[in-house]
Image (cartoon, rainbow, N blue to C red):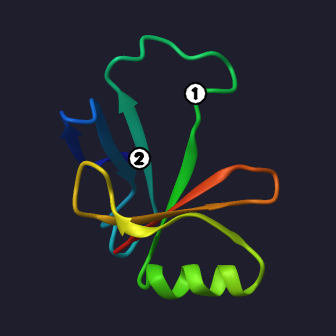
Amino acid sequence: MHVIRQKDYPEGKFTLCFLGYGDEDKEHCLELTYNWETSDYDLGDGFGHIALGTDDIYGLCKQIEAKGGRVVRAPGPMKHGKTVIAFIEDPDGYKVELIDK
């Protein structure tokens, strides 16, 4: 994998880095978050969630809720940016971020 893009969010004190094998509009990519003020992680807290891109975040969240799924953060702009995101929760309590393309 190679770095496709990365962006710093000084107000939130984190950096997002997107890794992949090709154009993220055509290939899957992995989003990693670097938290600036975290010097180390314990086993089990170094991984927060996985993120998936979607073409219709609002429609997908409605479908998930209609099937009994939990949307724990409704679609809307991210806290330190403009990208529309949402979070859903799997049956084990793990969070999955949805990102509107």
- Residue at (21%, 39%) from the top-left corner? 9
Name the amino acid type tagged 1: Gly
- Residue at (25%, 48%) from the top-left corner? 80
Task: Name the front one of labels 2 and 1.
Answer: 1
- Residue at (40%, 38%) from the top-left corner? 33
Q: Position of residue 21 (x, y in %)?
A: 39, 57
Badge 1: few (under 14), some or many (20 or more) residues near its Cα, within 10 Å?
A: few
Q: Which is nearer the eye, 26 or 87?
A: 87
Residue that badge 2 annotates:
1
- Residue at (66%, 80%) from the top-left corner? 64
Q: Which quarter of the image is occupied by the C terminus? A: bottom left
Along the horizontal axis of the image, is 80 left or right of 25? left
Q: Is residue 96 above or below residue 31?
A: below
Q: Position of residue 96 (x, y in %)?
A: 59, 57
The quarter of the picture where residue 68 lies is bottom right
Q: Earlier in the sequence, mark 2 or mark 1?
A: 2
Residue that badge 1 annotates:
46
Along the horizontal axis of the image, is 99 left or right of 64? left
Mark 1 element type? loop
Which label number is shown at residue 77?
Answer: none
Name the amino acid type tagged 2: Met
Counting every numbered tag in the picture gives 2
Q: Is residue 35 above or below residue 20?
A: above
